[in-house]
Image (cartoon, helix red, strand yellow):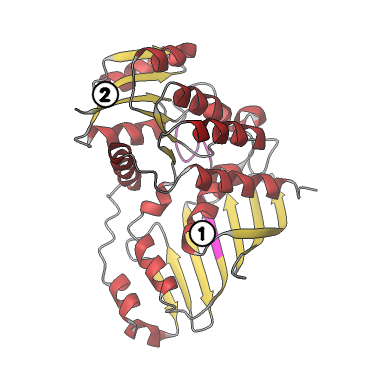
Amino acid sequence: MKLKVGLIGAGSFGYFHLSGYKNNANCDIIAIASRSEQSAKKAANKFEIPRVYWGDSWKEMLQEQNLDIVSICSPNYLHALMSITALENNCNVICEKPIAITKTELNDIENILRKKKLIYFSSFQKRYMIVVPYIKKIIENKVLGDIHLVRYFFGHRGPYTSWHASSEQKWFFDAKMAGGGVLLDLGVHCIDLLRYLIGEFTEIGGYNYNTSCKKIKYEDNCNVIFRFNNGTLGNITVSWCSEPSEILELFGSEGTLKIDLQSSTPYTFQPQKLKKNTFLKEALGADYNMNIIPQHKLIDHFVSCVLNKNQENPNFHDGKRAVEFILESYKLRS
């Protein structure tokens, strides 16, 4: 028997989920819901989805279709409500980031997950980039010695410039619907990947921001400095005002490594003698096929966990910690 899949939110991110399920032999996409009838029917036609819902009828979809899996790809302010409603209807859930925009919402999701033996994934596809396992090996095997500092820059031209809106409602720039600015949008990916590679973060030491290029209430550029539990210092910089770029830098006692996460030749390192290291040689010789879609690997992992009734990461706690990082940073706004 194939898993019965439904999706809420037929925008650009939803299409990545839908194509992932379509390519998975264990899944049958049977229902889709979206804010507009046009978006819902367009996606349904493209992916041959038989049952179509729009507006507030997503609740009916969850009640009527006896779904095994629900992907939530709606605007930020709806993530918690839809997650909770899906869980109440005994659906396993994968939710786009951020999984919530307030601590109260996080608590509400956590409370229902305690009562239900269901799989919940936070949609952190950065963990599934080809380069990531090689970086993790380099860190764990101390190729650079002890890591003292990490810097992560992630930027592009922002919503509706770097990609097109799928509806007339440009919710990313609505403070109540989005819940924050570029830090909530891109920063959650940065802190999740760093938690995966380095470990848990502790205190956040500083936050500064500008509203430079978008006419919005929240930040379109910002920096956060913080510390990990192991003493490593962290710096995250995110921007909606830059050319597309995603750079991770690791500074260790024995060397430095710069990784261009959007390149098929990602590494720059010092000193040059590091190229003799087995783990770095393996990384340098790998094939970084940029056509492989990390979101599809995430979907496959999620589906496998649902089939095996086995919760793995990135789970609710990972999504929760990413949101908590953002909310704690926002407390430092002057």
- Measured as percent of width and height from the top left, residue 218 is found at 68, 39
Q: Residue at x 28, y 37 (%)?
A: 307
Label 1 sits on what residue type?
Leu
Residue lying farthest to the right in this orientation: 334
Q: Earlier in the sequence, mark 1 or mark 2?
A: 2
Label 2 sits on what residue type?
Lys
Q: Residue at x 32, y 22 (%)?
A: 43
- Which is more foreground, mark 1 or mark 2? 1
In what element is the residue under mark 1?
Answer: helix
Q: Is residue 162 magenta?
A: yes
Q: Residue at x 63, y 29 (%)?
A: 174
The N terminus sits in image quarter: top left
Q: Nearer the viewer, residue 120 or 122?
A: 120
Q: Residue at x 29, y 60 (%)?
A: 288
- Measured as percent of width and height from the top left, residue 295 is found at 35, 43
Residue range of the region highlighted in magenta in the rendering: 151-164
As measured in the structure, the alpha-carbon distance from the residue carrying label 1 to the one carrying label 2 is 36 Å
Would you call the spot at circle 2 few (<14 residues within 10 Å), some (14-19), or many (20 or more)?
Answer: few
Where does label 1 land, which residue? 194
Task: Tell me if residue 39 can be seen.
Answer: no
Where does label 2 land, which residue? 46
- Measured as percent of width and height from the top left, residue 52 is found at 34, 14
Q: Is residue 243 above or below residue 132?
A: above
Q: Nearer the viewer, residue 248 or 278?
A: 278
Judged left or right of residue 299, residue 121 is right
Quadrant location of residue 205? bottom right
